[in-house]
Image (tube, coloured by chain):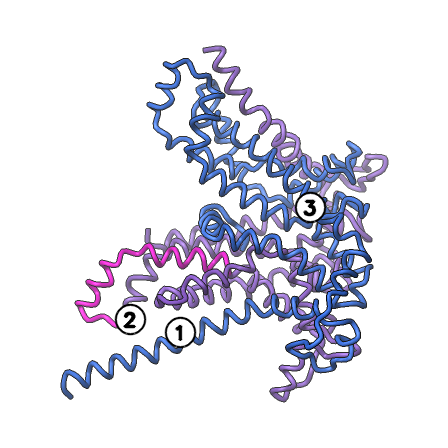
Amino acid sequence: MNNNNLKGWLYLLPAIVFLGFFMVYPLVDVFIYSFEEGYNFASQSYSGTGLFNYSFVLHDPYFMQALKNTILMVIITVPLSTGFALLISLALSSIKPLRNAFQTIYFLPYVTNTLAVGLVFMILFKKTPYSDGLANMLISLFGGTSVDFIEGPYWAKMFVFCFYIIWVVLPFKILILTSAIASVNPMYYKAARIDGAGSFTMFKKITLPMISPMIFYLIITGFIGAFKSYSDAVALFGTDLNAAGMNTIVGYVYDMLYGDSGGYPSYASAAAIILFAVVLTITVINLTVSRKRAVY
Amino acid sequence: MNYEEIELKSRRRKTIKNVIVYIFLAIWAIMVLFPFYWMILTSFKSYSAYTSEYIPKFFTLSPTFQNYIDAFTAVPLAKYFLNTLIFTLATTGIMVVVTVLAAFAFARLDFKGKDLVFTLFLSLMMIPAELVVITNFVTITNWNMRNTFMGLILPSVTSVFYIYLLRENFAQVPDDLYKAAKVDGTSDFKYLTKVMLPICRPTIVTVIILKVIECWNSYVWPRLITDDQAYFLVSNGIQEIRENGFGRENIPAMMAAVVVISVPLIVIFLIFRNKIMEGVSRGGTKG
């Protein structure tokens, strides 16, 4: 028995060592950092403890800008992408020929490098001295005035940002929803058809309730994922996101840690904990709502 | 209205509905494919042709490979590629060993404190990477591991979620097999490698695929930990090209680099399409 005890721990040892060093210890440490004021990276010393780091971050205009960008983007992209994914999945489920081909195509963005394809979006939307870019060509085709989506007005930048994020997150949502729709027992539809239900009634009364747990799952993971987006913004607007006015909360954390304005692990820690608190709150709210609404 | 008319009408309505559905699906398919088309197209346009097109053209009559030559010669793109390959293989390899051992311990071995440790592991699943990356950055810096493969690899070789996924799968293997193996005098390790792993291969393949995609796309950690170009991964490399390299000027060459970086994962996807889609729907999170 004693021998068995030892063996079990031996199998666990690598995982425990790695998790201990790179997960548990950092988790404790990040809270300590966030309360240490004036932490100096080189000498590893600090001048006092308190809430100053939090107050600094919350009064930093760059953080407020990042917070605003992130929240606006989350509010726009999560409902739009979930709704759009639902529409596409319903359309996919109603056809037979070409369904596999469409599914394969729709999944492509999932397996692409976010940074690399973001650059394609950048050149599609960017205005350069020699060309207005493809997006602007389409706009002027319909009689609009051209606008620089990458370095122009805020709403234009926000539009590209949201558009790219929706493009990136849709594959996962479509995949989950198509398999959820496919798993609804066809007997329900047959019974409903005998009762003379139309296709919209069937969607509202059968499909939607049956897949509602998956929709709520997607909304929750969508919120969490969108709150943490960062590399999408880098791909479109470059690494100096503060200058572009398009930083995200995660971007703010990394900028504080490293880069031109970096070297402040205390501020970075405080910002990361604020982010964690926001995400946790929203997840709890989502879970409470979904428990009331979802049909299991 | 007789029966035939009703049938005709309903069939016509069905056809119209189908046409609308297909048009809708086709429009989104074009939206998805267009960026890929555009990057391939641009990568074959010559620099002078690209900059002289005020209105971008949707085709090119004189394709050139010069951009690909430029992409590989002007920056160490091949080196970025090799780095990413080493990073991906090493991280995935170590991760599989670590998670399989841990999952086996949780699923099959009996030892004191197992339930408590498992609960602790599960609670770690809720911790976002952003929260621990700050201290990890400091740790790796203090260990003088910046700009090394060790520094890149070490923090990402464990995943509580994959341990959980594997444990669930291992636990489904019937107890009787284990008892029979024990009677035959098979050691636990031999049982794991000869019986468990072959039975659970689909799940392990899933985990490997997900990890490979994650590694190939990882950007944040490598950016923090490397500032020496000799250790850049493709994501950091492409960002470097865009900000300081030829990407500011020579967009066709940058698109050639983008094509080169995107192709491997797309090829893997087209080969293992079903495995990947099944794996992602079981354990994917990007989105």
Task: State yes or no: discs 2 and 1 in contact (Cβ < 8 Å).
Answer: no
- Mark seen at residue A199: 2
Residue type for callout 3: Thr
- Amino acid residing under circle 1: Val
**Colour blue, chain:** B
Q: Residue drawn at (64%, 51%), measured in percent from left and top?
A: B217
Which stretch appears magenta?
A171-198
Position of residue B154 measured from the top left corner of the image (x, y, whole percent): 67, 35
Magenta includes A182? yes
Kindly report the distance in space between the C-alpha atoms of the residues bearing marks 3 and 2.
Answer: 50 Å
Judge left or right: residue A168 versus residue A137. left
Does the segment drawn in magenta span residue A75?
no
The amino acid type, in three-letter code, at marker 2 is Ser
Q: Which residue is mark 3?
A: B84
The label shown at residue B21 is 1
Dot 3 falls on which chain?
B
Closest to the camera, between mark 2 and mark 1, is 1
Circle 1 chain: B
Do the dots labelled 3 and 2 sit on one chain?
no
Q: Same subunit under labels 1 and 3?
A: yes
Dominant secondary structure of the residues highlighted in magenta in the image: helix
Quadrant in the rendering for residue A148: bottom right
